[in-house]
Amino acid sequence: MSATPAPSPVPEPGLPARVRIHEVGPRDGLQNEAAVVPVEVKAEFIHRLAAAGLTTVEATSFVHPGRVPQLADADELFPLLGDLTGVRLPVLVPNVRGLDRALARGAREIAIFASVTESFARANLGRGVDASLAMFAPVVARAADAGVPVRGYLSMCFGDPWEGDVPVARVTALARRLLDLGCAELSLGDTIGVATPGQVGALLTALDAAGIPADRLAVHFHDTYGQALANTLTALRHGVTTVDAAAGGLGGCPFARSATGNLATEDLLWMLRGLGVETGVDLGRLAATSLWMAGHLGRPSPSRTVRALATEES
Ligand code: MG
C-alpha cells in the first residue's frame, strides 16, 4: 500500500500552530450507538486511539449503569487502561456518587455535563438548570480536594429542540457560573448540530467580552447538517485550540434521529493537516482504527475521510 493520502498544507495566517484534539469517541460516541461493545473491545479501542497519537481520550461515564447501558461497564473498563501513562483519560460523572466511583477506579480527570436550556436540563438531568448546578457544586469541590481537574460541558449552546433559539446571554451566564464553580475548561456543545459559523463567531466574541477567553474553551460540534468543520474553522479563527471530535464520527444524533453525530476526528485531521496545524495524530492509524470499530458496531463509519481512505486502500 502507498502512503496514506494527505492534503497539500497551505497555512492560514492567524490560526493556532497546534490544536489539542479531545477525543470523545469511547464516551460520547459509544454512548449514542445502538450496539453495545464488550469491555475488552473498548479497552483496545482506547489503546489504539492513544497509539494513533491522541493525548486526551474521554474514556467512559460513571453514570448509573441502568441509565446508559452502553457504558455500564465503566468499573471494569477503567482498570484496563492503567498502562496508558502520558494520556489524559477524563471520565464523565453525573454526581458525587459517580465521582467517588471514578476516583476509586483511579480517574485523574473528570467532566460534568450541564445544560444551557431548562428543557434539556429537565429531560437529561431530571432537574432544572439551577438545581443541576447545585448538584454539580459538591462534585467540583470534591474533585478540587482530590487535585482532579474538571471540564464543564455546556449542552444546547446553539439551539434546542424544545425551545428553539438559545440567546447568547444564557450561554455566557452559564459559562461564568461553571467557571466560578471551579471548572478548568468549558466545552461549548452544539448538541443537535444546528449551529452555523456566524453564530459560533458571535458566541465566542460574547464570551470574550464577558471575560471568558478562548484558552478556557473547547468546541464540540455535531455534523448533523454538515456544518461541523465550518464551525470548527470559525472557532480556530477566534483563538480556540481545543476541539472535541469522535473517531469515525461515532455516535448518532439522538434528537435528530440522524446517523451523523459528532464531528469525525479524521475529517478534522484532514482539514488541520491542510491548514498546517499540528495535532500529533497519525491519520492513517486512526482511520484504520475507525474501520475496525465500525466492524464491531456493524455499521459503516459516517466519516467522509474514513470512507475515502478505505476506498483508496481497496
Ligand atoms: Mg457529542
Image (tube, rainbow, N blue to C red):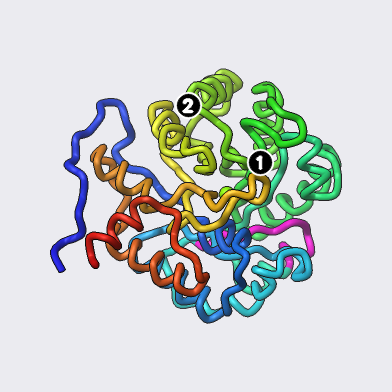
Stretch of the chain drawn in magenta: 89-100
Q: Is residue 33 left or right of residue 269?
A: right
SS assignment at label 2: helix
At a point 79% along the width and 64% down the height, the residue shown is 97
Going from the N terminus, do you reach mark 2 or mark 1 first?
1
Q: Position of residue 130 (x, y in %)?
A: 83, 37
Residue 155, numbered label? 1
Q: Residues within 10 Å of mark 1 (few under 14, many from 20)?
A: many
| Image: 144 above or below 168 | below
At a point 45% along the width and 54% down the height, the residue shown is 302
Q: CA distance from mark 2 to mark 1?
A: 17 Å
Q: Position of residue 284 (x, y in %)?
A: 27, 62
Q: Residues within 10 Å of mark 2 (few under 14, many from 20)?
A: some
Is 300 in front, or is 162?
300
- Residue receiving disc 2: 197
Quadrant including the N terminus: bottom left
Is 227 in front, or is 104?
227
At a point 60% along the width and 66% down the height, the residue shown is 107
SS assignment at label 1: strand
Tell me if I can see residue 220 in this picture.
no
Is residue 144 within the magenta segment?
A: no
Q: Amino acid at mark 1?
A: Ser
Q: Which mark is nearer the camera, 2 or 1?
A: 2
